Structure formats: structure tokens, C-alpha cells
Amino acid sequence: MKAMIFAAGLGTRLKPLTDTMSKALVPIAGKTLLEHTICRLKNEGFFDIVINVHHFAEQIITFLDTNNNFGLNISISDERGMLLETGGGIRKAEPLLGSEPFLIHNVDIISNAPLRDLYATHLASKADATLLVSERKSSRALLFDSENKLKAWKNKQTGEIKTPFKNLDTNSLEEYAFSGIHIFSPKLFPLMQKYPAKFPIMDFYLDVCKTANIKASVSSDLKLIDVGKLDSLAEAERLTESLG
């Protein structure tokens, strides 16, 4: 199985740490975020990995070389020329990703997510994309219908709704928080051709969900930390240690 790790981000919310290092190399419980993610993927059976790089890209490449790519087949999608955001990053990496569905994992996510099971769920459902979601607290939510098909995005603080559906009754939909982990089917690549060089993957999913099958996989026992801020580091260490 193949996976892509998003490791190109600037990590601005983790300043001042990211003034001198890539967010991917921030240490949690004695290992970098990137190592935690790679080892998690490896343990779940993902042996071909693509990693995109931009901010302190050389540090990431050196780190991988020093660790012999952790015994995996790792390819680099180089975004040093321009940070392409998540959607643009996936599209740029297309030549490295092959023709089979692949898992996408944000480098700053620590979780107990069942990645192998998520991949199997995606294949069985024949969805175009499968987003791992849960009922954890979040200021933003994805909205799904009774068949777990994506319909909209909501900012809970402002009430803003994004959806391609007119007159959508959002009160009839289920709200879930996105985990930063999803499965992407290459048959979606042709739909990306009209987009600019850089664009967020969630904007893409929300644009195409009217015609493409973008589904939720709901995890009832997901434990997850988004290591996006300095005050999340201690909590991430506790979760890491509890997961073993």
C-alpha cells in the first residue's frame, strides 16, 4: 500500500520552534513528528511513501538519508519552488503515486487511527475518497448525509457554510471533525486539472462532492492530537506514550 505524508507546511503556529526547523522534525517523546508518522504507516503495512517538502526541505531529506528511509521506499515531492497547499501538493505528486488509491496523512497528526482498516473500507465502498472523521470537538465540521456522503463544511464559530448544493438542509446532516487522514483515488486527478497551482484539498472535495463519491469513515474511538500549537506538545507526548 502507498501513502503520502504532508510535510511541506511552514508550521507558523509552532513558532519559534519552526524558525529553525521543519515542523516535521519537531520532537515528540524522543522522536520527530515525521518519524512517528512513518513508523505508524510502516506498522500498518504502508511501505511506499511519498513525502512533500518545502520549509527546511534539506533538513527532512538529510533526516531520511541518515535513517536509511526507515527501510521503506520513500520518494520526495519537491515543493521548494512554491508551497502548493494540500490539493496542489497531491496533484504535483501524481507521477510518484501510481494508479491505486493511496492514504494521505498530515505529519502533525498523532493518533490511534486504524490505517489499514481505513484503506480496506475505502476499497470495499468503491468511494472516490474516504475521509476519516470523528465526533471530537472542533471549531470546524464536515457535514454528511445518512449515507455518509460529504455535503458541506461548516465553521461553527461564524456559521459559515460551504457547499455545492442549493437549498441544503444542514439540520438534517451529521457533523464530524476531519482527522487529517484520508484515502484518495487517482480517478479524481482529472477533476483537478482546472484548479490553480495551489489549492486546499478540502476545497476540492467540497467542489466535487456533488458528482464524486466523497465519503466519511466514522471512528467512534479515535484518539487524536493535532500538533499545531505549542500548547499541544505536552498533550501529544502523553498520547504518544499511551499508544506505546
Image: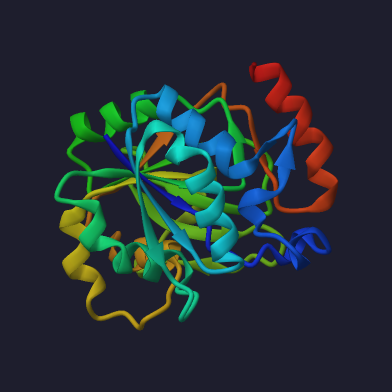
Q: Nearer the viewer, residue 234 or 144?
A: 234
Q: Is residue 12 left or right of residue 108?
A: right
**Percent position (x, y) of residue 209?**
30, 59
**Percent position (x, y) of residue 134?**
54, 35
The answer to whether 37 is drawn above or below residue 201 in the figure is: above
Q: Nearer the viewer, residue 143 or 54?
A: 54
What colouring does the structure picture have? rainbow
* Residue in the picture at 31% in, 38% down: 147
Could you tell me which quadrant the C terminus lies in?
top right
Q: Nearer the viewer, residue 212 or 79?
A: 79
Q: Number of numbered discs present? A: 0
* Residue in the picture at 50% in, 30% down: 39
The answer to whether 110 is drawn above or below residue 152 in the figure is: above
The answer to whether 131 is drawn above or below residue 53 in the figure is: above
Q: Is residue 221 left or right of residue 25?
A: left
Q: Quadrant of residue 9?
A: bottom right
In this view of the protein, can residue 194 be seen by the observer?
yes
* Residue in the picture at 38% in, 58% down: 76
In this view of the protein, can residue 211 be seen by the observer?
no
